Amino acid sequence: MNWKDLLNAVALLLIMEGLMPFLSPSRLKQAYTQLLSLPDKTLRTIGLVSVIAGILLLF
């Protein structure tokens, strides 16, 4: 892997992260409000599943 690949990955991350606030800021606020009501264990599980999915997609 070289620096260009890393920069491309960061660029894609920024694009994906920026889509929701750009397209529907009110829904994003609503989603954050719902996230605040979830227990920590649920958020950790969601995070772990996301990490595993990302690793699987890389391979």
Image (cartoon, grey):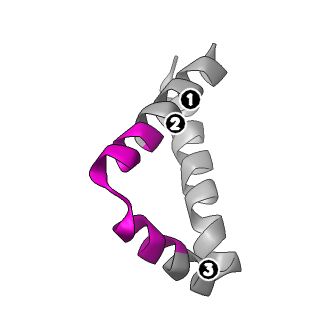
Is 42 in the magenta?
yes
Residue type of the residue flagged with mark 2: Ser
Is label 1 or label 3 in front? Answer: 3
Left or right placement of residue 33 versus residue 53 in this view: left
Residue type of the residue flagged with mark 1: Gly
**Nearer to me, 38 or 18:** 38
Say which residue label 2 marks.
50
Tell me the element at label 1.
helix
Q: Earlier in the sequence, mark 2 or mark 3?
A: 3
Residue at the (42%, 33%) spot, across then down: 48
Q: Quadrant of the C terminus?
A: top right
Say which residue label 3 marks.
27
Compared with 1, 8 (above or below) is below
Tell me the element at label 2.
helix
Compared with 17, 28 (above or below) is below
Query: Which image quarter: residue 14?
Result: bottom right
Mark 2, other Cα within 10 Å: few <14 / some 14–19 / many ≥20: few
Q: Earlier in the sequence, mark 1 or mark 3?
A: 3
Tell me the element at label 3.
helix
> Quick check: marks 1 and 2 in contact, CB under 8 Å?
yes
Bounds of the magenta segment: 31-46
Residue situated furthest top in the rendering: 59
